[in-house]
Amino acid sequence: MVRARRVVGAALVAMTVASAGSAMAQGRDAPGVVTETAELSGALWVRGAALAQRITYWSRGPRGPMQSTAAIYLPPGPPPPGGWPIVAYAHGSVGIADQCAFTLRPREFYLATVYPALLAAGFAVVISDYVGLGTPGTHPYLDGPSQARSVIDGVRAARAVTPELGARWAVFGQSQGGQTALFTAALAPADAPELALRGAVATGAPSNLEYGLTAAGPWVPRLPLRKTTTYFGLFLAGLRATAPELDIDSYLTPIGEQVLRIVESECVDDADALVRDIAIGQMLSRQLAGPALESAVRSMLRIPTEGQTVPLFLGQGLTDLEVPAPLSLALIADLRSSGADLQVGVYPGDHLSAAAEALPDALAFLHRVLA
């Protein structure tokens, strides 16, 4: 039966892609227009999935249309009335090199734990790679608005080729994806009124980084945190590619130039092994300052805390050395003072183990808002 359902699904996909081709003639790069589909199998298959496919679709980057890829996983059985509710999963930092794309390389924790749990709970799962990651152009790392639009347009694209999907959805993100989830919660209600965003889960979300980044200069020592130099290099590499007028190279020492070359070609863990002993101050010849640069950094990084209209769940690990708890405490205070509908979970673990510890609470939250 599953095989027959796949055949029918493939036929529907082909018909929808043909329709998308017609739409592309009128607006080939419109948000959510699908340009390619492919079945996922092998190491990228998720236990309990009735359908697994990768799609390529148009979205919106910092300077205009860009492409992204995404994976779609469906639960088994017939969809409920109105279609499967969707959990759009926003992934954490993997790098900006094309080979690091989340839907190309198996990540055991997600494929074996998170996605099966979401499918078993009765949610379809859509995972965007974000624009420029595995597609033309450079991924603008930590650019919250373009990451959010990648997620929103990924849901649009998934629904265009998967008729079993409904309009009710929530976003769930870890680390970089936690930041993405909070931007999505702020932007999606107005950006995609045809979709019914019901809530957002963010674990290990980096926040308040805009203050530290624009204060960075040659005086910054090696920090007692994890992957800080790698993350800093990824941010500068993405900013350099998407905003060349800022002349990021003029802020870099030869060591900084080498760090950016490494993070542009290696995935996060491999890059970290090469640069972890380098202090951020060794990368910079002068302070990251100036009105244009500071404005660009704020627009990319400053998480919207006012005007959040959907329920939020925020999870934080007490021993997280990648996103330290004090940063999240400031974010929680800002969200509460702005009147957000906020649930907070605090866990003993570090960056990734806290995400695992938060999963039962996140699932309960998703059940509540997607009911």
Image (cartoon, grey):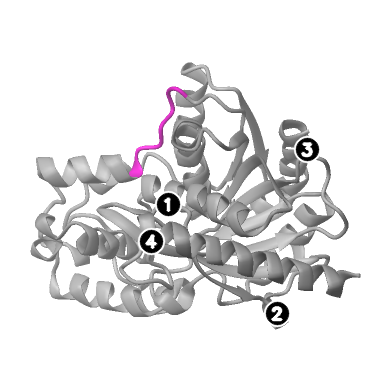
Q: Are marks 3 and 1 in contact (CB under 8 Å)?
A: no
* Residue marked by disc 1: 31
Q: Which of the two marks, 3 or 1, is nearer to us in this view?
A: 1
| Residue 332 visible in image | yes
Mark 2 → mark 1, Cα distance in angstroms: 27 Å
Labelled disc at residue 68 = none
The image position of residue 56, as x and y in percent, is 49, 67
| Three-letter code for the amino acid on which mark 1 is drawn | Pro
Query: Which quadrant would residue 52 be assigned to in this image?
Result: bottom right
Quadrant of the image for the N terminus? bottom right
Which residue is pictured at 58% across the width and 28% down the height? Answer: 310
Task: Pick whichever of labels 2 and 4 is earlier in the sequence.
Answer: 4
Mark 2: amino acid: Ser
Q: How far apart are labels 3 and 1 at the CA level? A: 28 Å
Which residue is denoted by mark 3 in the rendering?
Answer: 367
Instruction: Spot the residue most to the right.
Output: 1
State which mark lies toward you, 2 or 4: 4
